Amino acid sequence: MNARRPGGFTLIEVLLATVLLAAGLALALTTLRAATGTVERGEGLAERSERMRAVEGFLRRRLGSAQQIAFHTDETTGAIHLFVGEPDRVRFVADLPNYLGQGGPHLHDIAGHEAGGRRRLTVAFGMVMTGRTIETTDPRPPEPLLEALGELRLRYRGFDETGALGPWQDRWGPGSLPLQVEIGITTEREGPWPPILVTLPQGTGQAAVPEATP
């Protein structure tokens, strides 16, 4: 009788099949990782864009609605404070957004604050009546606008002595509203954002004082 080949695969065939399977799994894993990375990067960009749009929209609406209403009156001189702009803080009066309360003129205090070892962009509100900010027994805590703030830079512009649009200044106020406000934001993770330029419809653009009054 003729000798027959035993059934099954040879060692070489098994090794070859194992190598091909491993290569296929490695290729699939690489493709999956690349697809996951692309999705995560896309989600990160979408989240960043949404956060930027939300913060920019809020700042534009609030500054754009600034009114010629005083939030502080010096009892000695009678000087009123309509708008106080500093390099990293700005204060003005605008109507409170309806979703935050009953509306009406409120002081808006937008600034960078340290909290838990990290800097945040916040806005605080205070009710304004008869040229003064009303102190309450239970004040509303500042509303966070942006976490992990790296740097906040505010600049202001109005008319110069000749009536032309003047240079940018680091301070403005307290007795007039500027024509324009430029907001520069840098975050710890994303770096600098595109500058935000806001025009104030009620801004008179009168000359700023050298120092903003506290």
Image (tube, helix red, strand yellow):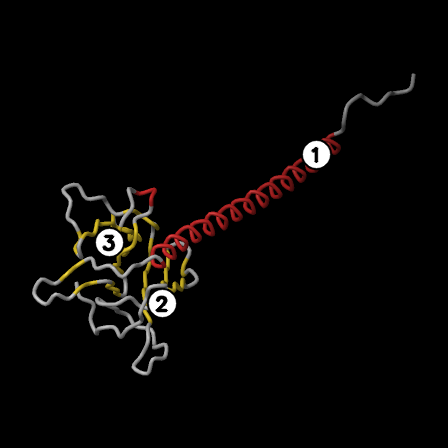
**Is tag 1's residue or tag 2's residue first in the polypeptide sequence?**
1
Tell me if I can see residue 68 in this picture. Answer: yes
Q: Distance from label 2 to label 3 (Cα)?
A: 19 Å
Question: In the rendering, at what x and y percent does residue 118 appear?
Answer: 28, 51
Q: Residue furthest front?
A: 130
Q: Is residue 94 left or right of residue 12?
A: left
Residue that carries the numbered disc 2 in the rendered image: 180
Question: In the rendering, at what x and y percent does residue 194 appear?
Answer: 44, 62
> In the structure shown, which secondary structural element does the residue marked by tag 3 occupy?
strand
Above or below for 80 versus 140: below
Tell me if I can see residue 89 in this picture. Answer: no
**Neighbours of disc 2 within 10 Å: few (<14), some (14-19), many (20+):** many
Q: Distance from label 1 to label 3 (Cα)?
A: 76 Å
Q: Name the kind of residue labelled 1 in the image.
A: Leu
Q: Are marks 1 and 3 in contact (CB under 8 Å)?
A: no
Q: Is residue 75 left or right of residue 13?
A: left
The residue at 30%/48% (across/down) is: 96
- Quarter of the figure with residue 21: top right
Q: Name the kind of residue labelled 2 in the image.
A: Gln
User: From the viewer's perspective, is the residue at label 1 or at label 3 nearer?
Assistant: 3
Which image quarter holds the N terminus?
top right
Q: Is residue 82 left or right of residue 63?
A: left
Residue that carries the numbered disc 3 in the rendered image: 107
> In the structure shown, which secondary structural element does the residue marked by tag 1 occupy?
helix
Above or below for 214 versus 7: below
Above or below for 15 versus 167: above
Above or below for 203 versus 94: below
Q: Distance from label 1 to label 2 (Cα)?
A: 73 Å
Q: Name the kind of residue labelled 3 in the image.
A: Leu
Question: In the rendering, at what x and y percent does residue 160 appear?
Answer: 31, 79
Which image quarter holds the C terminus?
bottom left
Residue that carries the numbered disc 1 in the rendered image: 15
